[in-house]
Image (tube, rainbow, N blue to C red):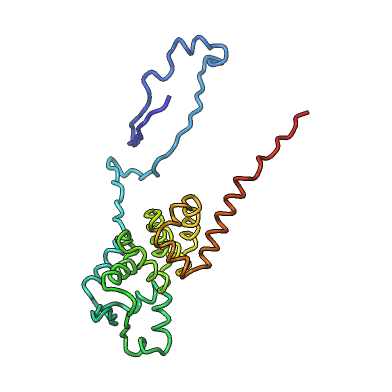
Amino acid sequence: MKSPRFFRFQQNQQWGFRKFIPRHSLLAQEPWLLEDNELSLRCKVTVAQDSLGFSDETTMPGIQVPRCTLADELGELWENSFFTDCCLVVAGQEFRAHKAILAARSPVFRAMFEHDMQESRTNRIEIHDLEPQCFRAMMGFLYTGKAPDLHSMADVLLAAADKYGLERLKVMCEDALCKDLSVETAAHTLVMADLHSAGQLKTQVLDFITAHASEVSETSSWKTMVGSYPHLLAEAYSSLASAHCSLLEPPPKRLKQS
């Protein structure tokens, strides 16, 4: 018999089944169940929680460990500009930040502060290739590790994550772009994956293009890609040829049974 519940055993308390084994079942198997008129039971007990111990008549309550709020607290440092020691300038807007956190999270920022560069001497960094909205999303991830709204800016965040060495954000962007993949976006996404060394995304896009080759080849983004990135056309053709060859291969012969 099994119980779907867990039971907490208190001192001098018992749990069990009132009709565990009917008496007539025992008596019917008397020769081997009731040897010398004694019944032996072998039990398997699974402990769901370590014993808390007993102190007189009072049982100590379990200790509730609060959830980790580190990400929230670091996020407040960023949102409220507490104790900042450097400035990042994006499209004329200034954002206060913390060198230690930037250096810990991004190898690119770390290099800026470690070496005798202008950023290290002035504690001021000019960001020229990001819009403020995308920059805020990247910094929010950098401080908290939480993914921003990727569906509206996954392509530009992929570029930012690649430039600043944020590998986890980069893979998150790859995943978002892969989920939004369509005939119209396939060629553009392939270019993005190639430019920013997004290997997982590139493999997925090539497989998608192979499966929808005739439709994708009619899109304007495909024709643009063919003119500007001919090596990607070669890769797509190679993927298509490999898939075609695998379809043409005869099935393996069955071994004759003797």
Kindly give the residue lying farthest to the left in the view shown: 80
Front one among 255 and 45: 255
Q: Residue at x 41, y 27 (%)?
A: 2
**Residue nearest the observer in this picture, 254 or 73:** 254
Q: Quadrant of the N terminus?
A: top left
How many labels sit on residues? Answer: 0
Q: Is residue 226 above or below residue 98?
A: above
Q: Position of residue 42 (x, y in %)?
A: 51, 27
* Image spot of residue 68 (x, y percent): 31, 59
* Quarter of the rendering containing residue 116: bottom left
Residue 181 left/right relative to 234: left
Kindly indicate the quadrant of the structure image that contains residue 155: bottom left
Between 67 and 76, the one lying in front of the other is: 76
* Residue found 44% across the figure and 63% down from its top: 223
Residue at the outermost right position: 258
Residue 26 picture location, percent across and down: 48, 13
Q: Is residue 141 above or below residue 112?
A: above
Examine the rendered structure and indicate whether residue 75 appears above or below residue 46.
below
The quadrant of the image that shows the C terminus is top right
Is 104 left, or right, of 58 in this rendering? right
Q: Give the residue at x 41% y 20%.
A: 20
Residue 89 appears in which quarter of the rendering?
Answer: bottom left
Q: Could you tell me which residue is drawn at 52 percent across and 59 percent down?
A: 236
Pick the residue in front: 14 or 216: 216
Q: Is residue 2 above or below residue 134?
A: above
